[in-house]
């Protein structure tokens, strides 16, 4: 059985990067919430994700989704050592900005701004791109994330040295690598399966 290709309903697709809440519209039909079995719910990990069209689409392969979600949670929510949450989110936001994933950038820029309180710097990243001057430590995190995103093999000792000079220890550097690498993949998945949509005006 082949997946049903959907035509997205009339909507406004955002063309600029933003911290606003966005919707996401799939191009392939996600599973209906009422059709999710215990196996699918186990793959979702969080029952609340059953409300998301994106995760219901990925739930068609629940074992892969389960591995993906547990990896995501460990990278961004594990409080044991490493980077503060704000800078893990910064790495994801920078990667998403570079890759042109407006939806993912909105989510992770919002988290980066919330946890860091550096709203103006986050907005500068969104508006000016990954070359924006965000001060030494954040510049090093963004540069490492972008290098991993553009050509992973070009990430090397000089990027590690720059991160260490910016004050990151080994566990924090691993968090930068994991957050950027995960979203370098996740952006491409989301960009190939649907498109962002601005929520209806109230």
Image (spheres, rainbow, N blue to C red):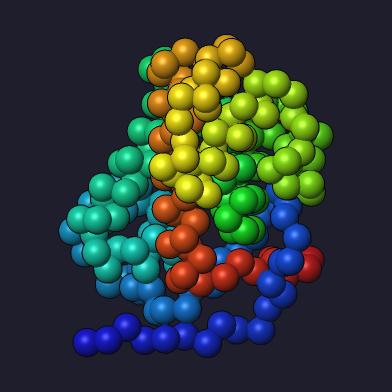
Q: Nearer the viewer, residue 133 or 59?
A: 133
| Residue plotted at (56% across, 82% down) | 8
Position of 7 relative to 114 (above/below):
below
Residue 172 rendering spot, x and y as whole percentages = 46, 20
Q: Nearer the viewer, residue 82 or 60?
A: 82
Residue 73 rendering spot, x and y as whole percentages = 38, 37
Q: Nearer the viewer, residue 147 or 113?
A: 147
Query: Along the horizontal axis of the image, is 39 left or right of 192?
Result: left
The answer, for residue 86, to whether it is visible in the render is: no
| Residue plotted at (57% across, 70% down) | 195
The answer, for residue 143, to whether it is visible in the render is: yes
Q: Please tell me in which quadrant of the rendered image residue 125 appears.
A: top right
Residue 84 rendering spot, x and y as whole percentages = 54, 21
| Residue plotted at (26% across, 50% down) | 66
Residue 201 rendering spot, x and y as whole percentages = 78, 68
Query: Along the horizontal axis of the image, is 178 left or right of 65?
Result: right
Quadrant where the N terminus is found in the figure: bottom left
| Residue plotted at (26% across, 47% down) | 67
Q: Please tell me in which quadrant of the rendered image residue 54 appears.
A: bottom left
Query: Along the horizontal axis of the image, is 155 left or right of 146?
Result: left
Query: Along the horizontal axis of the image, is 112 left or right of 54?
Result: right
């Amino acid at each position: 059985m082949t997946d049903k290709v959907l035509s997205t309903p009339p909507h406004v697709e955002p063309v600029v990067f933003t911290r606003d809440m966005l919707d996401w519209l799939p191009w392939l039909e996600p599973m209906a919430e009422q059709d999710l079995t215990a196996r699918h719910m186990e793959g979702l990990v969080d029952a609340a994700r059953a409300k998301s069209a994106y995760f219901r689409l990925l739930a068609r392969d629940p074992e892969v989704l389960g591995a993906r979600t547990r990896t995501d949670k460990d990278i961004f929510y594990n409080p044991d050592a490493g980077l503060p949450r704000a800078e893990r989110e910064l790495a994801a936001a920078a990667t998403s900005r570079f890759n042109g994933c407006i939806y993912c950038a909105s989510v992770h820029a919002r988290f980066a701004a919330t946890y860091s309180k550096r709203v103006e710097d986050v907005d500068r990243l969104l508006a000016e791109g990954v070359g924006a001057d965000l001060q030494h430590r954040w510049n090093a995190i963004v540069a490492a994330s972008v290098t991993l995103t553009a050509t992973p093999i070009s990430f090397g000792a000089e990027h590690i040295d720059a991160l260490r000079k910016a004050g990151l220890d080994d566990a924090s550097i691993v968090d930068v690598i994991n957050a950027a690498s995960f979203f370098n993949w996740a952006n491409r998945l989301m960009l190939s399966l649907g498109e962002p949509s601005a929520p209806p005006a109230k």
